Image (cartoon, coloured by chain):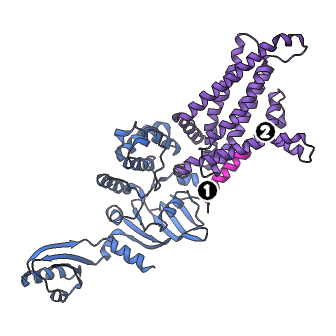
Chain colours: A purple, B blue
Amino acid sequence: MNMISAIAWREFRTQFLSPLAWTVLAILQFILAFVFLSQVETFTMLQPQLAGIENAPGLTDIIVIPLFGNAGIILLLVTPLLTMRLVCEERRNFTLALLLSAPVSNVDIIVGKYLGSLGLLLIIVSLITLMPLSLLSGGTLDFGKLFANVLALVLLVSAFTAAGLYMSTIAGHPTVAAMGTFGLLLLLWILDWTTSMQDQSNKLFEYLSILKHFQNIQSGLINSSDISYFVLFIVGFILLSILSLDSDRLQK
Amino acid sequence: MAALIEAEHLYRYYGKHCAVNDVSFTLTKGEVLGFLGPNGAGKTTTMQMLCGNLAPSEGRITINGFDLLDQPKSAKRYLGYLPDTPPLYKELTVQEFLHYCARLHGINKVSIADAINTAKERCGLCDVSNRLIANLSKGFQQRIGIAQAILHNPEVIILDEPTVGLDPIQIREIRALIRKLGRDHGVILSTHILGEVQESCSHVQIIHQGQLILNESVASLNAQMNTGTLQVTTRMQADTAILAAIPGVSAIETIGENRIVIHHSVSGGAVEQIIETIISAGWGLEELTPVLRSMEDIFITLTKGSE
């Protein structure tokens, strides 16, 4: 446990020693603030009409759900950049030997790295959450739905990070890892576009699509099957990463 | 005394190529073992296997009684390793990096500061402790690599070409440090510089094309080298036939005008007779230099012989 935290802490800190983490934080916040403000604008425009409708969508539905939905798409682009160097760079800089000859197991290394890079993404999620919370100064929010959205985004970035970590373990070059992660995630994201076609594999594709599960939780329906999809996804990729690091010693 | 490292019948294949072929040896406390071989002989592969970075294709490694494959965590606790490229996080400062290493090696929080200070002192890093590793010269980076390997005071220290990139003064310091460490640790040192082995090691192993072709103590190796070489310069041409007739002289080479190299045996007073002959013949002795017979000769003989 001690080892995991040492590895995770170094990983987390190192991100802030390069401009990458700061740039990502700044740009993401800027873009999402723009999305957020335009949603607030939409809401003020729609407000008179909404007052007439019974059971109308509220502040949370109009602002929070699109904000988190867009955040999900942007993080799909950003996470591969944050995870690409995790193991790949260590191998290229020959620093992996330091970890491999220290009394730490491969599980410690992988889990430590996973948690370290997840840390930055959790900061991003909490910064995004602060935006709708600022609306509390002039209105009320549906906290249940907000919680569901935060949970959905946390699960989403955790899954992205796990996939990125695995790609970084098997790739020889960081850009290859980033490209691989991006391709994999995008494929899983758009898989359910085929669900409109009448086809045998529809059900399978629908289940595999990340977007479907993300949207289910986002809508406030916290379902054990969606949660277990994400948990399986994360655990699966972490296990694959550990196995891949193990096979490093047996290489060639 | 129990052996710190026991390696038994190690093999390592890369595909069909056999990089390490049936290597067995032991290391005990107080030994500095020099691992010698030309490039590509299998030195680094062997070291990587000893440190758990590579799994051997066959064979067994025990470190301080713990099997490296069955109990890797316990075994690696006794290990300090400097790979051929020092494993440094260049974006950290020296202090931060050593602190991270200390935590990785499970040094308890109370003694981390002491351990870091000792390592910094031993490797001469006190003045640069707050500088970024990326901004330091190659020599300093190499020293940080060594500091990292001895930080947790491990029983076994494995150094892969530790003096590469250092200036002559630093090389001397590092060799002295290695000798000092060798007193209460077991040290393995790989190098292709023969002088380094003669100067800092107590035992030597020569590895060539994956096989151990020599495993001896440096002292007994020196004793074995029963031949000496003299370089002689005279004012007038020396008659090599007369010199060659002296008992104990094995060969004479002419390397220039009035300049010869005499190979002779160390025992039997051959040197004395050579000098007496030259002086009494009146050739005008100007220079007489004993050429130190180095391990180089043995090395070349052994590696050539096995081809």
Q: Residue at x 62, y 33 (%)?
A: A120
Q: Chain of mark 1?
A: A
Q: Which mark is residue A86?
A: none
Q: Residue at x 49, y 62 (%)?
A: B44
Q: Are marks 2 and 1 on the same chain?
A: yes
Q: Amino acid at mark 1?
A: Asp
Lower position in the chain sequence, tag 2 or tag 1: 2
Pointer 2 local density, CA inside 10 Å: few below 14, some 14–19, many at least 20: many
Q: Residue at x 82, y 26 (%)?
A: A220
Q: Compared with residue A162, is residue A59 higher up or lower down, i.e. above or below?
A: above
The residue lying toward the viewer, choosing from B191 and A46, is A46
**What span is colored magenta in the figure?**
A235-250
Q: Which residue is the site of mark 2?
A: A210
> Could you tell whether A68 is left or right of B222 in the image?
right
Tell me the SS state at disc 2: helix
Is A100 included in the stretch rendered in magenta? no
Q: Quadrant location of the N terminus of chain A? A: top right
Q: Which residue is the site of mark 1?
A: A248
Image coords of residue A41 (percent x, y): 74, 16
Q: Compared with residue B238, is residue B11 higher up or lower down, i.e. above or below?
A: above
Q: Chain of mark 2?
A: A
The residue lying toward the viewer, choosing from B47 and B42, is B42
Is A246 included in the stretch rendered in magenta? yes
Residue A148 figure quarter: top right
Front: mark 2 or 1: 2
Q: Amino acid at mark 2?
A: Ile
Image coords of residue A5 (percent x, y): 58, 38
Q: Is residue B269 visible?
A: no
Q: Is residue B72 visible?
A: yes
Residue B8 figure quarter: bottom right
Q: Residue at x 57, y 39 (%)?
A: A11
Magenta-highlighted stretch: main secondary structure? Answer: helix
